[in-house]
Amino acid sequence: MSGPSPAGKTAAVIGGGPAGLMAAETLSAAGIAVTVYDRMPSFGRKLLMAGRGGLNLTHSEPLAAFRARYGAAEARLGPLIEAFPPAALSAWAEGLGQPTFVGSSGRVFPKALKASPLLRAWLARLAAQGVEFRARHEWLGWDAKGALRFATADGKVSARPDVTVLALGGASWPKLGSDGRWAAVLAKAGAEVTPLRAANAGFDLAWSEMVRDRFAGQPLKGVALTFGGRRVRGEAMVTRHGLEGGAVYELSAALREAIAAEGSARLWIDLRPDMKAPALAARIAQAPSDQSVSNRLRKSLHMTPLETNLLREAHGKDLPSDPAALAEAIKGAPLTLTAMRPIARAISTAGGVAFGAVDEALMLTARPGVFVAGEMLDWEAPTGGYLLQACFATGVAAATGALKRLAGQPFG
């Protein structure tokens, strides 16, 4: 992560999350005097939140498949990820004393399965490289002369660095620091900003009172979800509002757009994806026909009360008694989703600074010398390590672009 070393140059990094801290590391390693600003009392809060789930840093799948996870943004993000790929991220973590391992799903985690040891070691490394930290500094934009403006407890202050990296995050989990208020500042400065939207979030649906009260918080394990011709295997979680979970998140972008266009979206759930309908019917037929449908399903297919009641939510209270019809109901249970959960509760954010508003070095064309990294950029990806990988990679890329500008070098 080294680069040219222009002596006596300064950089401001605004945002102390993964993208911002990685930009600060890259810049300070090249000899730049770096100050990191954040409006919160401490740094890396979203990284610590991610650590509650084991800190899924990246994914081990082949790079071509990895790049495809970014959809429409792949053309711009793909080369940046190849420049700082998953293997480099794992090596970086190991350099901080946090070796990684590949889980059964292909996801990559630190062996400690938490973020705090990595963050402590990282902040110590940055301090050793001369990085200064300014907490409780809320960025307000620029003044008339182009200086950065911040609000602090002691009043407004300003700074005039040689280059700036913006890494203020999206708008999910605002209590951790990323509230999206920067969007209006950049739009006023002439940058194209796509409206921020929830990504990797749950969805609302009209459960019956019984399902809400009895089954909220229970998982649907080993199911397959289908929407828009795409089928995803995984788990989902029933909530009082509707559904969430990894399998739902993989389809969330398409579901979100369908709801925006049509007002609702019909999601299909296969409760037994490893069995075909005829095999299911044969098993159901072996159960005594004089028993209730729920008992037949429990005995023949080990179906849980949640699964049986989900079938009733999807197909009506009176489920068919015919084994073939019941098997088809199990293979395709439709649920109507009516809204995505609020952006403040989403795992990540879609929208942000359009790639057309930045050059290949991630510098704002409307504001030369200002670079953008992380979730501020207009991209989205499913959970599984793709979110953090892109934040780290764009942090490296923005800092690399800033170093080349400081050195008077062309990018490319």
Image (tube, rainbow, N blue to C red):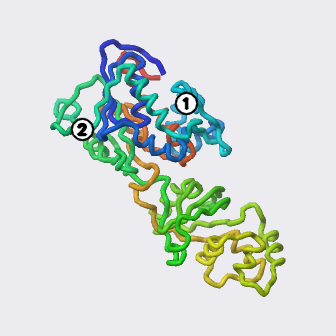
User: Residue 213: x percent and y percent?
Assistant: 50, 74
- Of the two numbered discs 1 and 2 on the same chain, state the one appearing first in sequence: 1
Residue at x 45%, y 65% (from the top left corner): 339
Residue at x 31%, y 25% (from the top left corner): 132
Task: Check disc 2 and give the amino acid type.
Answer: Gly
Q: Nearer the viewer, mark 1 or mark 2?
A: 1
**Of helix, strand and loop, which one carries label 2?**
strand
Vertical arrangement, residue 296 with respect to residue 219, above or below: below
Nearer-the-camera pick, 115 or 301: 115
**Of helix, strand and loop, which one carries label 1?**
loop
Residue at x 62%, y 63% (from the top left corner): 220
Task: Check disc 1 and give the amino acid type.
Answer: Gln
Q: Quadrant of residue 323?
A: bottom right
Residues at discs 1 and 2 in contact (Cβ within 8 Å): no
Nearer-the-camera pick, 246 or 4: 246
User: Residue 8: x percent and y percent?
Assistant: 30, 14
Left or right: residue 323 versus residue 34 is right
Residue at x 34%, y 44% (from the top left corner): 177
Vertical arrangement, residue 9 with respect to residue 244, above or below: above
For the image, the number of numbered tags is: 2
- Structural distance between the alpha carbons of marks 1 and 2: 36 Å
User: Residue 341: x percent and y percent?
Assistant: 44, 61
Left or right: residue 165 versus residue 302 is left
User: Residue 202: x percent and y percent?
Assistant: 49, 60
Left or right: residue 151 versus residue 216 is left
Is any atom of residue 387 visible in this view?
yes
**Disc 2 residue crowd, few under 14, some 14–19, many 20+, Cα 10 Å:** some
- Name the disc covering residue 98, or none: 1
Q: Which residue is mark 2?
A: 141
Q: Residue furthest top?
A: 7
